Amino acid sequence: MSASNQLITVRIMDGEYKVACPPEEIDDLQRAAAFLNERLGEVRASGRISGPERIAVMAGLNLAYELLKISREANAERELTRTQAERLLRLVDASLSKITEQPL
């Protein structure tokens, strides 16, 4: 644990866990723990899965799937933005070329 880290206790499902965390990230860590608890509760409430380990695995799998899906969508958006920016630059270049070619 770094000297600047603080030991924070987070409650996940029925357990408490101590986590070393930089002071400026404590709020994010607590929000992440609350978000995870919410997701674990959703899996538990579905009634299809029992046992804390299986609930944790399914919640983790669901979160990993959502992260990959969001990442894929963000990459597609980034590629679309890049393509549109390149198109706009070509249009600007073409317009500037026409302006500079015209006699004064």
Image (tube, helix red, strand yellow):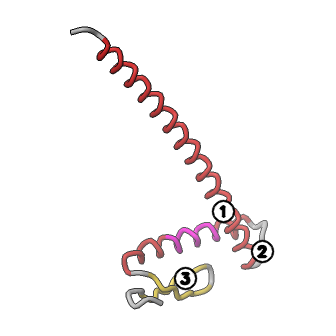
The CA span between labels 2 and 3 is 19 Å
Residue picked out by circle 3: 11
Residue 64: image tag: 1
On the image, the x and y values in percent for residue 71 come to 59, 53
Q: Quadrant of the C terminus?
A: top left
The secondary element bearing badge 2 is classed as loop
Q: Which of marks 3 and 1 is nearer the N terminus?
A: 3
- Alpha-carbon neighbours of circle 3 within 10 Å: few (<14), some, or many (≥20)? some
- Considering only vertical position in the picture, is 75 above or below 40? above
The secondary element bearing badge 1 is classed as helix
Q: Which of marks 2 and 3 is nearer the N terminus?
A: 3
| Circle 2 or circle 3, nearest the eye | 3
Task: Tell me what residue is drawn at x 41 percent, y 75 percent.
Answer: 25
Residue extending furthest toward the top: 103
Left or right: residue 39 versus residue 4 is: right
The CA span between labels 1 and 2 is 20 Å
Q: Cβ–Cβ below 8 Å for labels 1 and 2?
A: no
* Image: magenta residue range: 32-41
| Circle 1 or circle 2, nearest the eye | 1
- Alpha-carbon neighbours of circle 1 within 10 Å: few (<14), some, or many (≥20)? few
Residue 50: image tag: 2
Q: Cβ–Cβ below 8 Å for labels 3 and 1?
A: no
The CA span between labels 3 and 1 is 21 Å
Left or right: residue 92 versus residue 48 is: left
| Circle 3 or circle 1, nearest the eye | 1
Residue type beneath disc 1: Ala
On the image, the x and y values in percent for residue 28 come to 44, 71
Residue type beneath disc 3: Arg
On the image, the x and y values in percent for residue 78 come to 52, 43
